[in-house]
Image (cartoon, rainbow, N blue to C red):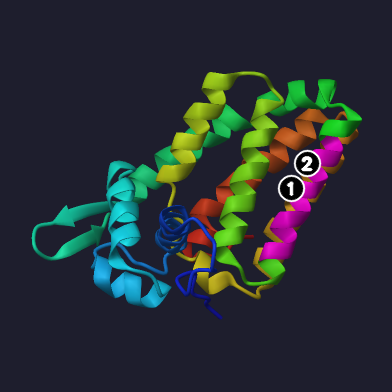
């Protein structure tokens, strides 16, 4: 069962930011497929807002590489090739995995409690079929995890790589055991870190990132 992340915006929300996050989530999850042509007025109608904040959001997404402007037509969703995706995943595994050993050695109870809250937000978003919330919560968890390692530049690099990642099968994973399992892996990761099992945490994180090439790309995993 798939779910749409594009819909009416709540009253009082930051329109541009909310629209940008929702469209980005739709692109990352595959709801808006590569090559799709969208217009600000059409999206504005779906969000229930004026075209101005939508146009501003799309221009920001263009800067982030999510869309290309098409003269007099709108915006076309950009593609990430299989090779690009493979390279991004392998780099992320190599960058995000090893720091888990240091985090496991130094993790403090208050930081672990904070990670638990963020992990539960991912689980709750998965259960609620909230793809935009899932992706936002997932980003927040993983970046906070790297912040605990203490290398600001590493965190910034990984954030940029995550923004380039596409998970075209994610929208079809709503309500599945695979989505629930992936969400629960965040709690399992905190379990390993609290147990000072850095190697185990690294192994789990590498496998977790690997879902981008498996489940989130519409492929079965062992």
Residue 131: image location, x then y, percent: 56, 64
At a point 42% along the width and 69% down the height, the residue shown is: 31
Q: Residue at x 41, y 38 (%)?
A: 87
Q: In the rendered image, is residue 66 in sight?
A: no
Asked if marks 2 and 1 touch (Cβ < 8 Å), the reply is: yes
Q: Is residue 114 part of the magenta span, yes or no?
A: yes
Residue at 36% in and 67% down: 32
Place residue 50 in its image quadrant: bottom left
Q: Residues within 10 Å of mark 2 (few under 14, many from 20)?
A: many
Q: Is residue 12 above or below residue 89?
A: below
> Which region is colored magenta?
112-125
Q: Residue at x 48, y 58 (%)?
A: 18
- Residue linked to disc 1: 118
Q: Which residue is mark 2?
A: 115
* SS label for mark 1: helix
Side of 114 relative to 153 (left or right): right
Q: Is residue 6 left or right of residue 84?
A: right
Q: Name the chief secondary structure element in magenta.
A: helix
Mark 1 crowdedness (10 Å alpha carbons): few <14, some 14-19, many ≥20: many
Task: Please provide percent x and percent y for residue 12.
Answer: 54, 62
């Amino acid at each position: 069962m798939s779910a749409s992340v594009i819909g009416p915006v709540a009253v009082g929300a930051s329109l541009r930011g909310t629209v940008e996050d929702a469209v980005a989530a739709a692109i990352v999850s595959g709801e808006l497929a590569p090559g799709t042509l969208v217009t600000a007025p059409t999206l504005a109608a779906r969000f229930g807002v004026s075209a101005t904040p939508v146009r501003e959001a799309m221009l920001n997404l263009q800067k982030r590489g999510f869309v290309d402007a098409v003269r007099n037509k709108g915006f076309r969703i950009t593609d990430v090739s299989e090779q690009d995706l493979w390279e991004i995943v392998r780099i992320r595994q190599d960058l995000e995995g090893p720091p888990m050993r240091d985090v496991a050695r130094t993790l403090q109870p208050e930081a672990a409690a904070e990670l638990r809250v963020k992990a539960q937000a991912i689980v709750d978003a998965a259960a609620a079929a909230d793809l935009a919330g899932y992706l936002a919560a997932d980003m927040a968890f993983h970046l906070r995890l790297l912040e605990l390692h203490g290398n600001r530049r590493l965190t910034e690099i990984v954030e940029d790589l995550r923004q380039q990642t596409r998970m075209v099968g994610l929208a079809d994973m709503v309500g599945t055991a695979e989505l629930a399992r992936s969400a629960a892996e965040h709690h399992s990761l905190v379990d390993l870190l609290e147990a000072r099992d850095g190697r185990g945490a690294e192994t789990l994180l590498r496998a977790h990132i690997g879902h981008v090439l498996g489940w989130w790309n519409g492929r079965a995993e062992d």
